[in-house]
Image (cartoon, rainbow, N blue to C red):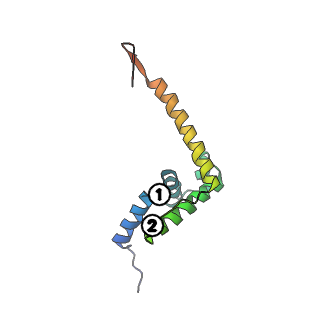
Amino acid sequence: MPLTSEPDAALVAAYRAALDRVPTLTRVVFLLHRIDDLAFDDIARRLSIKVVAVRCFVAEALLMVRAMLDGEEAHRKGDAAIALAETALHERYRGYCEEHMCSATITVSGRRQF
């Protein structure tokens, strides 16, 4: 069967649906690598995580998407590098939000307003 230049629309839709079900951070790292064509080192630097974590995220995304496309239930690998990177990013995000939410509050009539 000859290769076509256009991928099958149903396969593209299934791929996108599967990718949407991948955990957010895993999906973001995967898209930075595959769509934005960033090297692992660049992604690690941008997210302040280790290169090994970036590799694990990309591998996890590929495994999960493949499993979903094959009709199987996708499971996370449970990789320690992923867990450490996610924890660090969540803590930084929480700190950032707390810092900016506190500075964004305005007191009106003795009540805190956002």
Is residue 71 at all visible to an observer of this figure?
yes
| Residue at the spot 39% in from the left edge and 78% down from the top edge | 4
Q: Residue at x 62, y 57 (%)?
A: 79
Q: How many neighbours does mark 2 have within 10 angstroms: few (below 14), some (14-19), or many (20 or more)? A: many
Q: Residue at x 49, y 33 (%)?
A: 97
Tag 1 secondary structure: loop
> Which numbered disc covers residue 68?
2
Is residue 39 shown to the viewer in this render? no
Mark 1, other Cα within 10 Å: few <14 / some 14–19 / many ≥20? many
Q: Quadrant of the N terminus?
A: bottom left
Residue 56 figure quarter:
bottom right
Residue 86: x %, y % from top left? 57, 47
Q: Percent position (x, y) of residue 31?
A: 49, 57
In the visual, does 110 lie left or right of 42? left
Residue 75: % across, % down: 52, 61
Rendered image: mark on residue 22: 1
Outermost residue, bottom direction? 1
Residue type highlighted by circle 1: Val
Residue shown at 65% from the left, 56% from the top: 52
